[in-house]
Image (cartoon, rainbow, N blue to C red):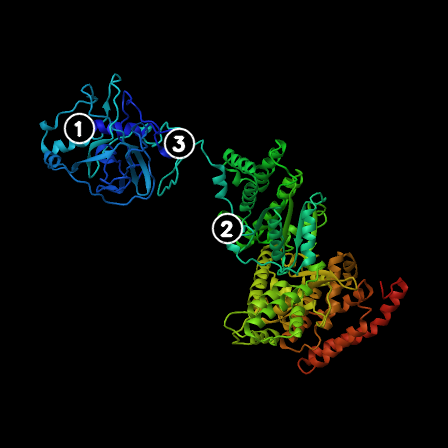
Amino acid sequence: MDPGFAASYALWNMHHLSPYPNLTTETPPQQPPPAIMNAQVAAPLSHRPPVSLGLGSVLAASRGLYGTTQPGHFPTHPNLSITAERPPLGPGLPQQHMQNATRLGEIGRGFGPVVEPSLRNLYPSHPLQPRFETYPESTSFSAWEGQSQIRSTSLLRPPAPAAAATDAVPRPSTSQLSTNDRGQELDRQTVRHRAIPSSSPQTPYEQGARIATFDSAPSRVAVSPETRSLFHRARNFEIENFHVGDATHVTVNSSHIDGWELLLEKIATNALHDSSARYDAPKCDEDTRVEVTGEMMDWIEDRDGPKSILCMTGAAGSGKSALQQTVAERCATSDILAAAFFISSADPTRNVASAIVPTIAYQLGLKHDGFRNSVAAAVKHDRHIFSRSLQSQMDALIVRPFKNLQRSKQLDANTFPHAIFIDGLDECSGEPGTSSRLTDVEKRRLAEDRQAELLVAIHYSILNNGLPFRVLIASRPEWAIRTALEPGGHLHEAAYHIQLSDNYDASADMRRFLRRRFEIISLQIRDPQWFTEDDIETLVRAASGQFIYVAVVYKFISARRTSPAERLRIVLTWVPHEGQMARPFETLDRLYTNILLAAKNVYEAVDTHRGRDFSLLFGIFYNCSDPDYSIFFAAENLSALLGIEARGEENLISDLRSLVTLRTDSDGDLVLGVYHKSFRDFLDEESRAKDFFVSRFHVDLHLTKCCLQRILEWCPLDLDSLPREYQELPEFDRRRLQVAITKLPFSLWDKTYSAFVDELVDFTEKRGWHKLDRLLPLVYLGEGRLSVIWTDWIYYFRNHVGRLKSLKPEIAAVITGFIDKWEGDEEEWLRQMDNSGFSDTD
């Protein structure tokens, strides 16, 4: 047979692909076109030489039967390979409907067809050794560059060519050529097309064909632009299981896009309430947290309630996720669970905001076929929807599909599942593709922006469109949700707010939790006396309403191959010491450390906070909030003394709201409040807090330095102008001086360490006592409290000077002289107060 003629038919079929899926031909063509496309193609990779896929290369394959495949490859192009795929033959497959399926996959190397001796003898010196193979009618051939497919063709062979068929390009017969010329001419023949007259008769196709094939391929062929694409002018077809490797670029244009499949690529299955990744997720015992779960269920079931968003905030470890999981499972049982998304900072598949809307839309689609079809159509219409804002995604994938189905009466909003859960909002981060180049602080801000964006999207996309969903969001009271719920925030009036730390006492629930689990351990170890009710009460008090504390304790006590009684004793009497192996609170320590570290990074990155030590500042605020500390500071006064901005205490604890708060005491002063005793235990123990541990010594020393520094840095060189300038100071700056002078002797109480003495020496050398002497009457007569505590103020100064005499007698003498003067001046200050109408309470 004429090899060039057969190649023409093979490659002609390649350029007229089937309109049916999987690159199949429903009905074989009855006649080839008048002119066959050029059989020359090339690898699309620019770093590879051109490769001919004519008859001598495209049709290199093995003799396998019934779908078996053995690939072929080319020694001159080691990264190129050819494979043939043969369909099964039999009586169930009519000749008129032979399938030509192209299979795409990873191709190996090597093949082993039988070389026909007569052809080898005909061209003994040709480097491309020919051989004959018989292929079924719908054998498919694929050419690969590495793992990238560059050509695919299905062979449909007619009977022997008619006599009318002539070469489009005249060529000498091989008998007229020398041995080497014969090989080169045959090489050219395999890539040269044939012209078929339009008057060629229609002929039936045969099931088999004897095709000449070669081991290698020429590399000196040209390519026309139209033949570079495998799918040139093809329409209405689909490709399944398509894989591309090492390709310069791949473009797919098809009207058959499955929008639902594209959506599935964007969802986070680990975030579902019943995901296997969340196996044994924390949830409430049947008779615990009854008050909270009851309130949540009542709110969900009241579909006509005025507020469609519930925000549950609570401190770290207060049981928010357990409550969400418990209520979500109840909703699933009642068939009112629409969707759930449990965020986790530790799982990169479910800690990004971009996965939330697609995952919710996916779950809604499972509830209603019409909704699923609408979502798929929306994705098909805009394949880039997932790169748009969260509000645009929610509108396209949730709002419009739902409203369209409502409008067409295909969906009943009164019976559609309506409870949507989003848990762990504070753990939602920015997108991984952009955050890898950012600093930790920039990542934190990006995460906060995305959290805020999600809250806005929920508010304006769902609430403002009157959808029947009830959305429950749980989070620590961090920046995004806190600012949204505060007065002036967009959710302040729109959301129903449950604050776990403030309004719910979980002590009784924790008692039941521990008692039930300890009784189970009693059965396992056959010792009902291994714990007492007093032990449980001690643990509940230590938890301070923090459910995670009792959960961590139970996990430590019930560890395998340990003694529960011994481990309970360790927890109750645990005092860390060097070399101790038991770490019952390691989980809590890691939680607290991560929260503090994130807050430190964000705070110190603010340009106006440069040079500040977050750990030291927070340690001072924490120690001064302790009732046992020797000096009381209102939070605003402490901010003034430490040299931070007005209301600086708010900025300092902005990212610690899950652990601490600012509360008003009985005297109306703002003080730092710590939610959990376990957090105090953590901060008080250096082996646990590590870099966040601040000793009382360092607190006292820093406060003393601040008191002395505030006096030195403000007092003008011209002391005579001091009264006028003091009165012109802004209120916050005057308070700073008042706090420094009022607290100075108390910060020095019983401090004879060399560090404190050195500070006093430096202050004296800079004439600090003289400046204090000029400031003192202004503060005494001003709006501070110095006149009220004057007796104690003098007593503490004299006590310190008495201890200082043995260390620095000359400094002690200077201070004593000023104390004597001040005691004498007080009578004059009192007269001035009487004449000006001041009282001790002003």
The residue depicted at 72 percent of the width and 73 percent of the height is 630
* Mark 2 vs 1, N-terminal side: 1
Q: Disc 2 designates what residue? A: 349
Q: Position of residue 65 (x, y in %)?
A: 25, 40
Residue 43 visible in image: yes
Q: Nearer the viewer, mark 3 or mark 2?
A: 3
Q: Residues within 10 Å of mark 1 (few under 14, many from 20)?
A: few
Badge 2 vs badge 1, beta-carbon distance below 8 Å: no
The residue depicted at 68 percent of the width and 59 percent of the height is 501
Residue 762 visible in image: no
Q: Check disc 1 and report its element: helix, strand or loop.
A: loop
Of 586 and 442, which appears nearest the observer? Answer: 586
Q: Disc 1 designates what residue? A: 1
Q: Disc 3 designates what residue? A: 237
Locate the N terminus and report the quarter of the image it occupies.
top left
Of 250 and 370, which appears nearest the observer? Answer: 370
